[in-house]
Image (spheres, helix red, strand yellow):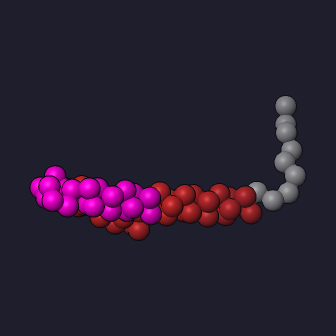
Amino acid sequence: MEKVRRLRAMSSLCRQQAAYNSMNKWKLLAEAEYWDHLADLALSSYFQQCNAITNTNDVGPKTISA
């Protein structure tokens, strides 16, 4: 999760720079989107790993009691 936080921070910095640097605004906004995309991938990977761990712990038949 620390990696996701750092990637989001990079995105935020790019957006802040874009607000003050009109010459490179579109480049910086594109870079912010790139960092957001990497953060989304990292977050997705994190939750897939969490789900994989949960699924391996839940191996075996489940009984339903009424």
Horizontal and vertical percent position of residue 40: 47, 57
Observer-nearest of 15 and 23: 23
Horizontal and vertical percent position of residue 45: 56, 63
What is the magenta segment's predominant secondary structure? helix
Residue at 68% over, 62% down: 52
Magenta stretch bounds:
16-39
Observer-nearest of 12 and 24: 24
Q: Is residue 50 visible?
A: no
Residue at 85% over, 37% down: 65
Observer-nearest of 64 and 40: 40
Magenta includes 23?
yes
Residue 6 is drawn in which quadrant?
Answer: bottom left
Q: Is residue 63 visible?
A: yes
Residue 57 is drawn in which quadrant?
Answer: bottom right
Count every numbered label the image shows and give the total: 0
Magenta includes 50?
no
Quadrant of the image containing the N terminus = bottom left
Q: Pick out the residue farthest to the left.
A: 20
Horizontal and vertical percent position of residue 46: 54, 62
Q: Pick out the residue farthest to the front.
A: 23
Q: Pick out the residue farthest to the top.
A: 66
Q: Is residue 31 left or right of residue 25?
A: right
Q: Is residue 64 left or right of residue 2?
A: right
Residue at 37% over, 56% down: 33
Residue at 39% over, 61% down: 34
Quadrant of the image containing the C terminus = top right
